[in-house]
Image: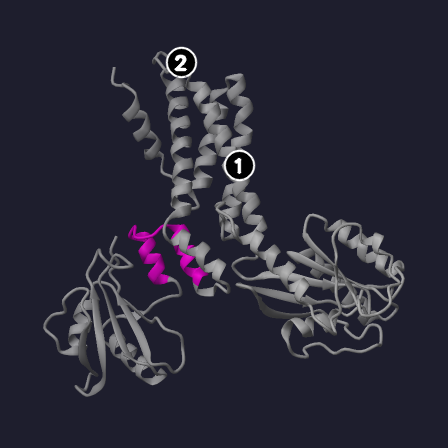
């Protein structure tokens, strides 16, 4: 599906650098490149050094030209890349000359869109391309590289194949009841349904655990006033980001910063101390603190070793109970002072430290939790669109169980077709002809 329009865009980041790449895609890409370089031909996939001329025949730069002949290019169309000297002015001049010769500026994502429409990539790879540019950790890059290699595509295709098998046999049984079907066909279908349920459920669970992998896991620091939350934030960042004071309620708003822990970039949120406050502004800050905890992937809860456990500490413990499904690290701070806090209140594992000394035990624990959420062979979905598609697929798979048991094959076929359409939306929309191919390929229906 080649497009009539030729598009152009600067493929490198804005600003000054050693090299800038201008990418041109479409049927006129090669003629435009030949015109600007005064070459008679460009050999595909060979870097050619050439002077670049403007419309007044003036040399504007010396650049490398690389020609990718269709269909062996990213978009499936002819592509020429101009690798010129880096700089805002040079890049814009070359792009302007390309536009004068008939190209237009590409819309955001248009190169990837053309690649999809021309069958060069599917939607999973398109999303992985977009996300890998924004990736903020090594683990995110590794995960997205798997999707670029087609791991999710293969996962979806396996499920599609099983669903097509079920749908084809069911449709044949509905429309051609006299056909001899395998005696164990319903047992086969039931086994396939159970396997699909397990695969989809495991994938959803793994994806939710690793939700923060692409943009950075969110870690909220929570505690009553003056337990050392801001001191901990400053220690993690290695600079004084938050104001530290003995006055309760100094931090009245959430403070968010990014920091690297091991191979992970995380978003650390320092929250306002949670207590009963009469000040309107402080109350708003406390509400934001609770909201930050609810949104966090990991919660670091601080308690003061030098003070007895009071009502404000109990509120924190209650908040942790309400978020017990999250990863929670309990920290007993100010371990350099005499112990007054009832440690039994913390029940399970907790870390003792002093933010005035070292926080390494907390950093090691944090890194361990982050690693456990990322180092897994489970399939991971990288967008809400993918998660929604899998949830809908799983819903219809579950709904199909009863009609299959009761022999209501029309209802069973409806849910399987819906499941097929939803899972296919992850890669490429399902077409009914695919089911017909399976039907007519597997059965002798030409009586």
Q: Nearer the viewer, residue 404 or 296?
A: 296
Circle 2 residues within 10 Å: few <14, some 14–19, many ≥20 = few
Mark drawn on residue 364: none
* Residue 104 appears in the rendering: yes
Could you give the CA–CA distance between mark 2 and mark 1, rounded to whole angstroms?
A: 27 Å
Mark drawn on residue 394: 1
The spot of residue 112 in percent (x, y) is: 35, 59
103 vs 429: above or below: below
Query: What SS does tag 2 mark?
Result: loop
Q: Quadrant of the C terminus?
A: top left
* Start-end of magenta stretch: 110-132
Circle 1 residues within 10 Å: few <14, some 14–19, many ≥20 = many
Magenta span has 128?
Answer: yes
Q: Is residue 86 left or right of residue 139?
A: left
Mark drawn on residue 183: 2
Mark before the other along the chain sequence, 2 or 1: 2
414 vs 352: above or below: above
């Amino acid at each position: 599906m080649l497009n009539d329009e030729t598009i152009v865009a600067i493929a490198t980041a804005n600003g000054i650098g050693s090299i800038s790449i201008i990418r041109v895609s479409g049927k006129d890409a090669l003629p435009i490149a030949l015109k600007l370089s005064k070459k008679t031909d460009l050999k595909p996939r060979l870097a050619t050094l050439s002077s670049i001329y403007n419309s007044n025949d003036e040399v504007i730069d010396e650049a490398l030209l690389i020609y990718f002949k269709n269909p062996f290019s990213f978009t499936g169309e002819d592509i020429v890349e101009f690798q010129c000297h880096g700089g805002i002015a040079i890049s814009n001049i070359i792009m302007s000359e390309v536009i004068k010769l008939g190209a237009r500026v590409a819309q955001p994502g248009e190169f990837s869109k053309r690649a999809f429409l021309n069958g060069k990539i599917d939607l999973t790879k398109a999303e992985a391309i977009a996300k890998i540019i924004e990736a903020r950790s090594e683990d995110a890059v590794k995960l997205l590289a798997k999707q670029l290699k087609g791991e999710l595509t293969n996962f979806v295709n396996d499920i599609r194949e099983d669903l097509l098998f079920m749908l084809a046999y069911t449709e044949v049984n509905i429309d051609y009841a006299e056909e001899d079907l395998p005696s164990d066909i319903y047992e086969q279908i039931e086994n396939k349904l159970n396997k699909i349920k397990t695969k989809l459920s495991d994938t959803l669970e793994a994806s939710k655990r690793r939700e923060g992998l692409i943009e950075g896991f969110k870690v909220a620091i929570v505690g009553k006033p003056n337990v050392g939350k801001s001191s901990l934030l400053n220690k993690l960042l290695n600079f004084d980001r938050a104001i530290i004071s003995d006055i309760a309620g100094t931090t009245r708003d959430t403070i968010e910063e990014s920091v690297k822990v091991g191979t992970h970039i995380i978003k650390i949120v320092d929250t306002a101390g949670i207590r009963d406050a009469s000040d309107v502004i402080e109350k708003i800050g406390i509400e934001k603190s609770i909201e930050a905890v609810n949104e966090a992937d990991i919660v670091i809860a601080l308690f003061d070793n030098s003070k007895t456990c009071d009502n404000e500490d109990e509120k924190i413990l209650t908040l942790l109970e309400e978020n017990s499904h999250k990863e929670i690290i309990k920290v007993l701070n100010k371990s350099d002072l005499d112990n007054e806090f009832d440690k039994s209140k913390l029940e399970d594992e907790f870390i003792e430290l002093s933010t005035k000394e070292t926080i390494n035990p907390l950093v090691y624990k944090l890194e361990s939790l982050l690693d456990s959420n990322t180092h897994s062979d489970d399939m991971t979905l990288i967008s809400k669109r993918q998660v929604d598609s899998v949830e809908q697929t799983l819903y219809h798979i579950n709904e199909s169980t009863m009609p299959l048991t009761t022999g209501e094959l029309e209802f069973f076929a409806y849910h399987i077709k819906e499941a097929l359409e939803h899972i296919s939306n992850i890669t490429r929309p399902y077409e009914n002809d695919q089911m017909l191919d399976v039907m007519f390929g597997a059965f002798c229906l030409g009586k």
